[in-house]
Image: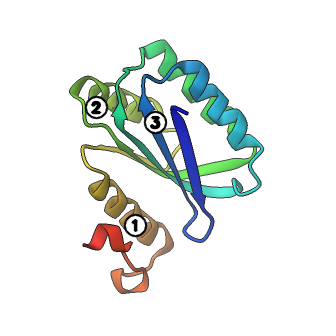
């Protein structure tokens, strides 16, 4: 399956990963599944890992995805969104997504490495909750 996800209900993070050639239909299916997932409630941060994605969306496809993000806000609101994109063309398109998605996320940022994205999400949670670095532990896989 080209689009998979897990929801960490404790940390309130959805980690979505895309593999290979990803079609718009597959992304839209992801949102349909997410809409019915009982763990997808209230507020979630997003880690979108496109590190193993070989396709690059067109601007009209990005608009279609943003429309789905808008529709799903009836069920869940997204706070911080970290996007991992390794390939240059995909990185550039995700920067465009970052700009266009401003109204759907408190903050969005594109990264080249998953570890950097994970650390940034932890820092964003701390900022939005007012906790200090000692109040929240950085995940083991990021800290090492």
The image shows residue 25 at horizontal and vertical percentages of: 61, 20
Would you call the spot at circle 3 few (<14 residues within 10 Å), some (14-19), or many (20 or more)? many
Compute the Cα span from label 3 to label 2.
14 Å
Determine the residue positioned at 26% across, 23% down: 89
Is label 3 or label 2 in front? 3
Image marks 2 and 1: residues in contact by CB distance under 8 Å: no
Mark 1 highlights which residue? 122
Question: Which quadrant of the rendered structure holds the N terminus?
Answer: top right
Foreground of the two, 131 or 11? 11
Residue 4's place in the image compared with 24, above or below, is: below
Residue 52's place in the image compared with 130, above or below, is: above
Mark 3 highlights which residue? 18
Residue furthest bottom in the image: 134
The image shows residue 118 at horizontal and vertical percentages of: 36, 59
**Residue 1 shows which numbered tag?**
none
Helix, strand or loop at label 1? It is helix
Compute the Cα span from label 3 to label 1.
22 Å
Residue 47's place in the image compared with 86, above or below, is: below
Determine the residue positioned at 35% across, 36% down: 52
- Please indicate, yes or no, whether residue 3 appears anywhere in the rendered image: yes
Mark 2 highlights which residue? 91
Residue 80's place in the image compared with 22, above or below, is: below
Q: Quadrant of residue 85?
A: top left
Helix, strand or loop at label 3? It is strand
Which of marks 2 and 3 precedes in the sequence?
Answer: 3
Left or right of 129 on screen, residue 29: right
The image shows residue 11 at horizontal and vertical percentages of: 54, 68
């Amino acid at each position: 399956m080209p689009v998979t996800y897990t929801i960490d209900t404790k940390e309130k993070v959805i980690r979505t990963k895309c593999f290979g050639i990803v079609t718009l239909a597959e992304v839209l299916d992801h949102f349909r599944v997410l809409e019915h997932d009982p763990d997808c409630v209230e507020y979630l941060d997003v880690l979108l890992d496109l590190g193993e994605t070989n396709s690059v969306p067109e601007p009209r496809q990005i608009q279609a995805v943003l429309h789905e993000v808008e529709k799903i806000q009836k069920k869940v609101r997204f706070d911080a969104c970290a996007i991992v994109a390794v390939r240059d063309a995909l990185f550039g398109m995700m920067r465009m997504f970052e700009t266009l998605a401003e109204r759907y996320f408190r903050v969005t940022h594109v990264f080249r490495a998953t570890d950097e994205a994970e650390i940034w999400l932890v820092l964003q949670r701390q900022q939005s909750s007012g906790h200090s670095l000692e109040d929240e532990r950085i995940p083991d896989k990021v800290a090492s």
